[in-house]
Image (spheres, grey):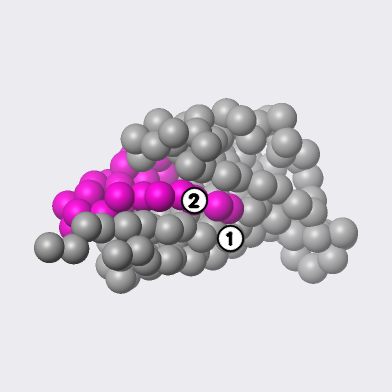
Amino acid sequence: MIRIGHGYDVHKLTEGRKLILGGMEIPFEKGLDGHSDADVLLHAIMDALLGAAAEGDIGLHFPDTDDRYLGADSTVLLAEVGKILEEKGYRIENIDSTVLCQRPKLRPYIPGMRCRVAGILGLEEDQVSIKATTEEGLGFTGDGSGIAAHAVVLISRNEP
Ligand code: MG
């Protein structure tokens, strides 16, 4: 049996925060604001994985009203999501994702992000696709107010 999942997330860019994307710190004059480390890409991937398994979303599992998740490292949360799927007998077949970001240019960091996500979830790098695009200066990503990310995943399970 195969199942598909979709995830979407947005965080605001602000002064005085580190920019963390795909589990990597990226040099930039601003960072994403949020209760956790605000890694918008990992949040979209986690929501896609949880969605595929019909296990709710990250707000349900890691509520931002819970101080345990204040400043949380999203790579640790991603590992937990991986465990939730594993316990339900699911294998992750592939992940595809797109980050919508005007600046900085993300291309140089994408191989590192793919390696990081694959490592955390016990996947091969070619099971993890990460793409980046600008929105041609339009909207909230275009004017640099924030960064958005989409992810889709395919998971599978052997049925008895
Ligand atoms: Mg988020």
Q: Which residue is drawn at 58% across and 53% down?
A: 97
Q: Does the residue labelled 2 lie within 8 Å of ligand 1?
A: no
Region of the chain picked out in magenta, as a range: 70-97
The residue singled out by tag 2 in the image is 95
Q: With respect to residue 15, does 151 lie above or below?
A: below
Res. 60 in view: no
The residue singled out by tag 1 in the image is 150
Q: CB atoms at circles 1 and 2 under 8 Å apart?
A: no
Q: Label 2 sits on what residue type?
A: Ile
In the picture, the disc for residue 87 is none
- Mark 1, mark 2: which one is toward the viewer? 2
Q: Quadrant of the C terminus?
A: bottom left
Q: Residue at x 73, y 36 (%)?
A: 107
User: 148 and 115: which one is in front?
Assistant: 115
Q: With respect to residue 156, does 23 lie above or below?
A: above
Element at label 1: strand
Could you say which quadrant of the image residue 123 lies in? Answer: top left
Q: In which quarter of the image is the N terminus?
A: bottom left
